[in-house]
Amino acid sequence: MVTIRLSRHGAKRAPFYHVVAADKRMPRDGRNLEKLGYFNPVARGQEQRLNLDLAKIEAWVAKGAQVSERVKTLVKEATKAAA
């Protein structure tokens, strides 16, 4: 089963997350099928906090991918910002 979830990157105390489509059986930071955007929770100043490719996310959901709870809230935030 494919799930759309966050994959953690970045340094200690400076998290940076990639939003990825990955097989549910793979480790959190392991192999993924496709990168769909990123989330930077500690963005400051001119740094972009959230960047998602909503068309790709919708395509994966149409194929049957499950979306994690945190990614659902980020997608809602991104659609509000786009509107």
Image (tube, rainbow, N blue to C red):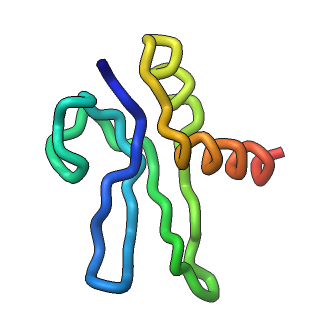
Q: Residue furthest right?
A: 83
Q: Residue at 80% of width from left, 48% of height from top?
A: 80
- The x and y percentages for residue 47 are 56, 78
Q: How many marks?
A: 0
Q: Residue at 54% of width from left, 48% of height from top?
A: 70
Query: Looking at the picture, does residue 33 appear above or below residue 8?
Result: above
Q: Residue at 53% of width from left, 72% of height from top?
A: 41
- The x and y percentages for residue 3 are 37, 30
**In front of the other: 71 or 82:** 71
For residue 50, which quarter of the picture? bottom right
**In front of the other: 29 or 48:** 29
Quadrant of the rendering where the N terminus is positioned: top left
Left/right placement of residue 12 relative to residue 25 reads right
For residue 54, which quarter of the picture? top right
- The x and y percentages for residue 34 are 31, 36
Left/right placement of residue 14 relative to residue 22 reads right
- The x and y percentages for residue 83 are 84, 45
Query: Looking at the picture, does residue 14 appear above or below residue 16?
Result: below
Query: Looking at the picture, does residue 25 appear above or below residue 29?
Result: above
For residue 15, which quarter of the picture? bottom left
